[in-house]
Structures are given as C-alpha cells and as structure tokens.
Image: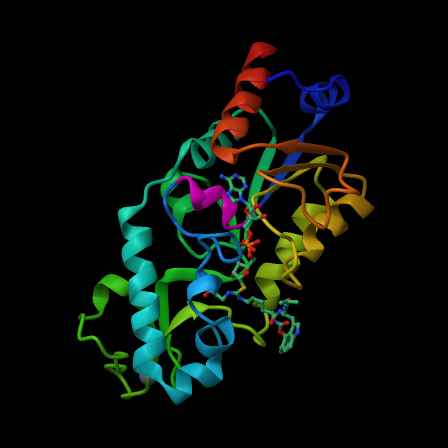
Amino acid sequence: MKFNQDFIDKLKTAKSVVFFTGAGISAESGVPTFRGKEGLWKKFKPQELANFDAFIRNPDLVWEWYQYRRKIVEEANPNPGHLAIVEMGKYFEDVSVITQNVDDLHNRAGSKNVYELHGNIERNYCIDCEAIYNTNELEVTGKAPRCKKCGGLIRPDIVWFGEPIPQSIFSAAELKAKNSDICFVVGTTAIIYPAASIPRLAKEDGAYLVEINIEPTEISHWVDYSLIGKSGEILPEILAEIRSFH
Ligand code: BV8
Ligand code: ZN
C-alpha cells in the first residue's frame, strides 16, 4: 500500500502514538461488531440487554447474553491488526491503546498501555459489595451468579448505556490523546459518547488523525488521513512502512 508523504513524515517524527479502537479491529478475529450487517444490535436490542435496568429486570437473560459473547471472545484470537499495534510499540517512545472493546484482545495480543473505556467481559463484580470476580472463577449455571461474600447479584464489568465511564480511566485516556502526535482511529463508528470525544480531543491538541475503516464514518470528513480497508491488513502495512526506515 502506498502511503502519502505527510503521513510517512509524521511516522518518522512522532514520539507519542494513540490507537483509539472499536469493534472493527476485532471483526477479523470473528468477534461480531455492533452496528454492521452481522452486528449484534441487528439480532438483539441494546436497550433490552446492555443496561442496568434490563439486568435488574431479567438478570439471567442478560447474564446469558454475556456468556454467549464470552464464548465468542474466548474462541477468538488477536488478529494481525492487534499484533501490528504491539510491534509498533517498539518504534515510538510511547504507544497507548484506548479501546471501546470489552473483548480483552489487545491485552491478549500483548499491548501494555491499554485503557478499557467500556470495561472487560472477563471481569465481573457484585452489585452490592463490588467484590470482583474473573469469569473463570464463576461456575456456569445458566443463571446470573451470586456473590460468595454477600449473596448479591454479579454483573459483567462493562459500561452499559446510561452508565459513566470510570473517571480515572477516562481522564488518563484523555491526557494520552491530548499529548499524542498521531491518533489512529481504528474500526469504530465513533458515535458512542463520551468515548467518541477522544479523537476530537487529540486533534484539537495537534495530533495527526488517521482513520482506518472499511467504510467512511461520521468523522471521515475531518480526519487528516482516511485509509479505507481492513485494519488486519492496513496496520501490518503501516508496520512494514515503519520498519523500512528504521
Ligand atoms: C453515558 C455496552 C451518562 C457494552 C456499549 C440517553 C440516556 C443515557 C445516555 C445517553 C442517552 N442518549 C445518548 C446517550 C449517551 C450514550 C450514547 O452515546 N448513545 C449513542 C447511541 C448516541 N452513551 C452512554 O450511554 C454512555 N454513558 O453517557 O452515561 C452518565 C454520565 C455521568 C454519570 C452518569 C451517567 C455509555 C456508553 C457505553 C455503552 N456501552 N455497549 C457491551 O455490551 O459491549 S456501546 C457499544 O458501542 C460498544 O460498547 C462499543 O464499544 C461501542 C462503540 O461501537 P463501535 O466499537 O464503534 O462498533 P460499531 O459496530 O458501531 O462499529 C464498528 C466499525 O468497524 C464500523 O465503522 C465498521 O465499518 C468498522 N469495521 C468493521 N470491520 C472492520 C472495520 N474497520 C476496519 N477493519 C475491519 N475489518
Ligand atoms: Zn457481594
């Protein structure tokens, strides 16, 4: 793939790089996105599942939906896109991943500075005493598990609609974005707030914005460079470009 010269120049001078990722980066690992043709929201209604009231109304249904998604995630592997991001970490002073994904694939790929804005499907906590449980600690019963300490309902450690992103994580991610020289926006429709404000913050503070997506999105008209294609193919090509001048 031929990249334009100002992007190549940026790659040569950048010190701090941020990858802001969404469900699209995991699509080639076989994890369904939310709003695509095969998207999760085509089959299920987020308002019926991905929010606290739905969970309280029907904890077993919501828990089972997350078990279904965990199974997909656990059978998935990081793809060349996740792995290229890890490798690129060797060529810049500071590389961070700010992800909206809950699939743990950046961690499993080996990325170090990962900011999980929407939580992680492998982590759970008690809604009463907030005791934390990893999924593999919980027995599979087809029903929402109960806390061993207080008997409270256990929920996925995921930010649902109407819930705030943990402030400490969001503030740290904002700072990384503001201080970045290049902010890659990879595989996201960039419509879910406040997460979707990250690329805008980066750009306002001088970052060079590069979008990687299989189709244009709502932000394509204001990024500096829009690369249309699969992230699992484009990210390794960017890595090869970097290696060509190191
Ligand atoms: C908040 C659940 C307030 C977890 C998700 C009314 C009431 C309350 C809030 C609101 C409201 N109206 C609006 C809001 C704000 C709301 C929001 O933004 N709504 C939208 C619809 C406008 N936000 C919230 O509710 C947030 N909380 O506002 O709280 C508050 C504040 C303080 C104190 C108290 C309360 C919480 C938002 C988080 C919600 N959680 N999911 C789960 O089950 O996973 S959202 C869901 O969307 C996922 O978490 C996902 O991370 C997120 C973003 O989706 P994407 O990652 O972009 O995925 P998508 O499918 O959309 O796009 C995939 C892209 O990849 C596409 O562009 C596609 O082209 C591309 N692609 C596909 N294949 C590839 C590819 N690209 C490259 N290569 C490929 N191979
Ligand atoms: Zn408890």
Q: 104 above or below 65?
A: above
Q: Position of residue 98 (x, y in %)?
A: 57, 49
Could you say which is closer to the camera, residue 193 or residue 119? 193
At which x and y percent is residue 108?
36, 43
Query: Can residue 88 be seen in this snapshot?
Result: no
Q: Dividing the picture into quarters, in which one does residue 80 lie?
A: top left
Q: Residue at x 38, y 61 (%)?
A: 121
Left or right of 134: which side holds 239?
Answer: right
* Magenta span contains residue 24: yes
In what quadrant does ligand 2 lie? bottom left
Relative vertical location of residue 140 with respect to residue 185 in this rendering, above or below = below
Placement of the N terminus among the 4 image quadrants = top right
Magenta-highlighted residues: 21-28
Q: Is residue 54 left or right of residue 126?
A: right
Q: Between 117 and 196, which is closer to the camera in this rendering?
A: 196
Residue in the image at 72% along x and 22% along y:
13
Q: How is the image coloured?
A: rainbow
Q: How far from the left and from the top, in percent, is residue 107?
A: 41, 45
Residue 39, placed above or below residue 85: below
Query: Image quadrant for the C terminus?
Result: top right
Quadrant hosting residue 76:
top left
Give the residue at x 59% y 39%: 213
Is residue 223 in view from this perspective?
A: yes
Is residue 70 shown in magenta?
no
Q: Residue 60 appears in which quarter of the rendering?
A: bottom left
Q: Position of residue 33 (x, y in %)?
A: 47, 53
